[in-house]
Image (cartoon, helix red, strand yellow):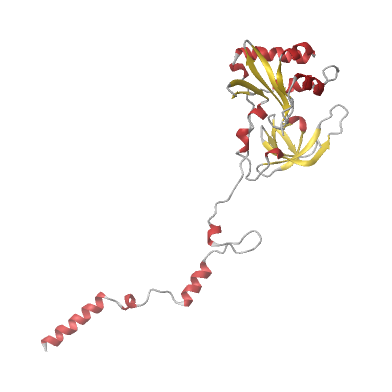
């Protein structure tokens, strides 16, 4: 009799240690799975298609504005700074003799690498009073620039938009054509919704790198200003118009100078493509 009582006590102890719920399967039933599925958040793509689980975890890509601020390393070399002042005065005075005296014998005249003083004279028509050389030189040289080592020689290239452009290319969208992009060269330039000086301002741009639309030019239609409106898009997606005098292409004319002995010579004046 005592043995039967001890057996019952053992059985009751085992039941207390292992409740019935623990013996049930942990695998959810089909109804449980349906409930869990309905509780999950459904994510769709922009066109209404369901996103895969991998796509739901992809980070959102947002393009950031790229800037190219003015830079002038010219004053770092006093000999170049003095030379540049003389060149700017020559451009103002249309001093052909001074200009010819500073040309490198193998000066680069265009992106194809055409060289030589004769080619330079023919291209810029120095014998004509309305030659574009003077305005081009004054604009390029006064816009700052930077020093670099080229073939072992210390060289200064201007303007900064061109000399610093390689630092910008890496900031452009992937697969973008760098030739489509230009630089706002002033501070607080109004981006307008239409090619009209009275159109609403979309935003204000300062030294931004922007995409210029091919064929998006519109004349200003002013008797005192021959500027042109350019249609542009910022890297953050804002679209509108700015006047061309506030923007410059890195493929526009650049000038490079190299020190030879005690003086400096111009080794290049060419537009790049």
Residue 181 in the image: state x and y as whole percent. 70, 38
The residue at 62%/23% (across/down) is 146
Q: Would you place residue 46 above or below residue 172 in this image?
A: below
Q: Quadrant of residue 189?
A: top right
The residue at 77%/11% (across/down) is 97
Residue 14 in the image: state x and y as whole percent. 23, 78
* Left or right of residue 56: residue 252: right
Out of 56 and 72, give the one closest to the viewer.
72
Q: Would you place residue 92 above or below residue 218 in this image?
A: above
Out of 270 and 152, give the one closest to the viewer.
152
Q: Which residue is the extreme one toward the left?
A: 2
Out of 24 and 58, give the one closest to the viewer.
58
For the N terminus, the image quarter is bottom left
Q: Would you place residue 140 above or below residue 96 in this image?
A: below
Q: Quadrant of residue 79?
A: top right
Residue 111 in the image: state x and y as whole percent. 72, 30
Residue 163 in the image: state x and y as whole percent. 64, 28
The residue at 77%/15% (across/down) is 92
* Left or right of residue 23: residue 41: right
For the C terminus, the image quarter is top right
């Amino acid at each position: 009799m005592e043995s039967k009582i001890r057996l019952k006590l053992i059985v009751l102890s085992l039941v207390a240690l292992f409740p019935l719920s623990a013996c049930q399967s942990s695998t959810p039933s089909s109804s449980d799975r349906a409930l869990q599925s309905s509780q999950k958040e459904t994510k769709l793509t922009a066109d209404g298609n369901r996103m895969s689980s991998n796509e739901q975890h992809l980070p959102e890509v947002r393009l950031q504005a790229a800037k190219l601020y003015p830079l002038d390393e010219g004053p770092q070399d006093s000999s170049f700074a003095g030379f540049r002042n003389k060149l700017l005065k020559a451009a103002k005075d249309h001093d052909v003799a001074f200009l010819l005296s500073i040309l490198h014998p193998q000066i680069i005249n265009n992106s194809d690498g055409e060289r030589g003083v004769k080619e330079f004279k023919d291209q810029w028509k120095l014998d004509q009073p309305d030659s574009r050389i003077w305005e081009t030189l004054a604009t390029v040289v006064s816009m700052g620039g930077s020093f670099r080592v080229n073939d072992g020689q210390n060289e200064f290239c201007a303007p900064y938009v061109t000399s610093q452009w390689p630092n910008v290319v890496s900031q452009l969208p992937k697969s973008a054509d760098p030739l489509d992009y230009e630089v706002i060269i002033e501070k607080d330039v109004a981006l307008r919704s239409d090619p009209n000086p009275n159109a609403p301002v979309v935003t204000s741009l300062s030294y931004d790198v922007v995409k210029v639309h091919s064929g998006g030019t519109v004349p200003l239609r002013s008797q005192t200003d021959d500027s042109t409106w350019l249609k542009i898009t910022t890297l953050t997606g804002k679209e509108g118009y700015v006047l061309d005098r506030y923007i410059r292409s890195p493929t526009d004319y650049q000038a490079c100078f190299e020190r030879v002995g005690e003086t400096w010579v111009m080794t290049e004046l060419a537009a790049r493509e």
